Image: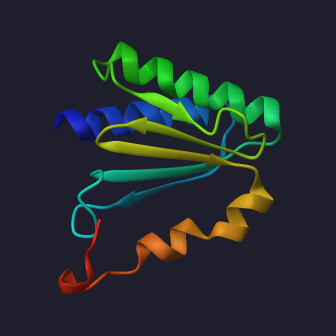
Amino acid sequence: MDKILRLKKIIIDTLDTNKAQNIVSIDLKDKSSMADYMIIASGTSSRHIQALSEQVLEKLKNNGIKDSKIEGKDSAEWKLVDGIDLIIHIFHPEKRSFYELEKMWSELIPKEKLII
């Protein structure tokens, strides 16, 4: 199995085991050069979101992604864990529905409009 697919499975399993809700994976390969996959999940509270982001960061580092980091440390409603080839967003459900990342990134973007 490809290393990035194995890591994606580890992250999704970690989120699932730790009670993240509505976990979605989006393939970015034909949409952006910033990462291969985006994983989006919801947490139930600010503490849950923080704990999930820390657990994901630990899994990334334990699997060789040493440069990974958490963005949004001061936010209670959203965290982004930068796993280089994996971008993981963990939202409070209301914030997630406001930003609608699944809708934005699930649509196929014509190659001539790709900027990122």
Q: Residue at x 73, y 42 (%)?
A: 43
Q: Is residue 103 above or below residue 62?
A: below
Q: Is residue 110 above or below residue 90?
A: below
- Left or right: 112 in relation to 102: left
| In-front residue for pair 66/28 | 66
Q: Residue at x 26, y 41 (%)?
A: 5
- Left or right: 81 in relation to 45: left
Figure quadrant of residue 95: bottom right
- Left or right: 32 in relation to 89: left
Q: Position of residue 104 (x, y in %)?
A: 49, 75
Q: Residue at x 57, y 22 (%)?
A: 55
Q: Position of residue 27 (x, y in %)?
A: 32, 60
Q: Is residue 56 above or below residue 115?
A: above
**Quadrant position of the C terminus in the picture:** bottom left
Q: Is residue 91 above or below residue 71?
A: below
| In-front residue for pair 5/99 | 99
Q: How many marks?
A: 0
**Quadrant position of the N terminus in the picture:** top left
What is the image's colouring?
Answer: rainbow
The extreme right residue here reads 45
The extreme top residue here reads 62
Q: Position of residue 89 (x, y in %)?
A: 55, 47
Q: Residue at x 76, y 32 (%)?
A: 48
| In-front residue for pair 95/11 | 95
